[in-house]
Image (spheres, coloured by chain):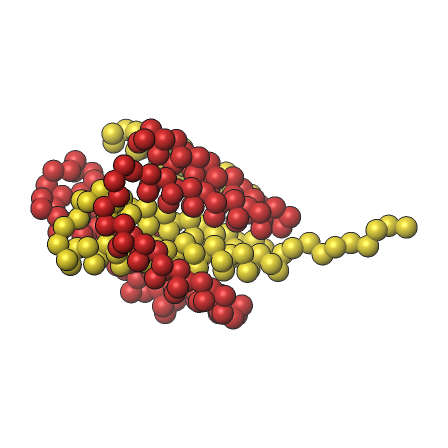
Chain colours: A yellow, B red
Amino acid sequence: MLITNLGTLLLAAFVGYFVISKVPNTLHTPLMSGTNAIHGIVIVGGIVLLATGAVHGTLSLALVTLAVTFGTINVVGGFLVTDRMLEMFKPRKREPQP
Amino acid sequence: MSDLRDVLYLVASALFIAGLSGLTGPRTAVRGNRIAAVGMAVAIVATLLRPHVHHWPLIALGVAAGTAVGVPAARRVKMTAMPQMVALFNGVGGGAVALLAWVEFRGPHGYAGDPTYVAIFSAFAAIVGAACRSGAPTSPSPSCRS
């Protein structure tokens, strides 16, 4: 399993390097915001812990629910602010050439 | 059903990568962000595709509370305060990571049954996540990529 995970890490590193290196400087801030929203994928970890019943005890249940809340804030807020930032980059409509 | 989940996770990964590649140009950027958001939705729905979902009220509560906090915050923040808001969202994400690592540690066996590298990375995640959370409100630095 370690080798599989390392394989995923390696491939992800290459994909990340090649995709991100093509992002122009002007789009770096929305890029940071968008990738931040994606790392909210941690919410899946919280949901898995709750959904599989792997968590017991009031404190642990409360902590995982809080983690899911935090993760949701990260995801929902992250994609929304990225969208707002990208509003500024929409190309303006051009007049049709005569 | 766990096969379907795995396939959907692959689909979500593909959507994340496709979405991010949209950010390489202004024309494709907005669509790219939305594609990535769909990928996240797919991943979350896939996680819930189980014969029996324990604690679903807690899951619903967490998601509802997060949405209730995140949506107004994202809509109302001034454009000039965007970097700080991104840092704040990053901080709560890191906080989630630290909380999950802590809860796993509190479990009946802690990390005793897991392979060593899992324990090392979990502890690392807890430290980075906690540092991220405490540092986030005061600086927009991207140092806490967890």
Q: Residue at x 36, y 59 (%)?
A: B64
Residue B19 is situated, as x and y percent measured from the top left of the image, at 52, 43
**Image coords of residue B143 (percent x, y):** 37, 57
Q: Which quarter of the image is occupied by the N terminus of chain B? A: top left
Q: Quadrant of the rendered structure where residue A16 is? A: top left
Percent of width and height locating residue B114: 15, 38
Q: Residue furthest right?
A: A98
Q: Is residue B83 visible?
A: no
Which quadrant holds residue B53?
Answer: top left
Q: Position of residue B137 (x, y in %)?
A: 36, 68
* A11 is higher (above) or lower (below) than B104: above
Q: How many marks?
A: 0
Instruction: Evaluate whether residue A27 shows in this view.
Output: yes
Left or right of A86? Residue B67 is left
Q: Residue at x 32, y 46 (%)?
A: A44
Q: Is residue B110 left or right of residue A45?
A: left
Query: Measuring 29% from the left and 38% from the top, which residue is drawn there?
Result: B50
- The residue lying at 43 percent from left, 46 percent from top is B41
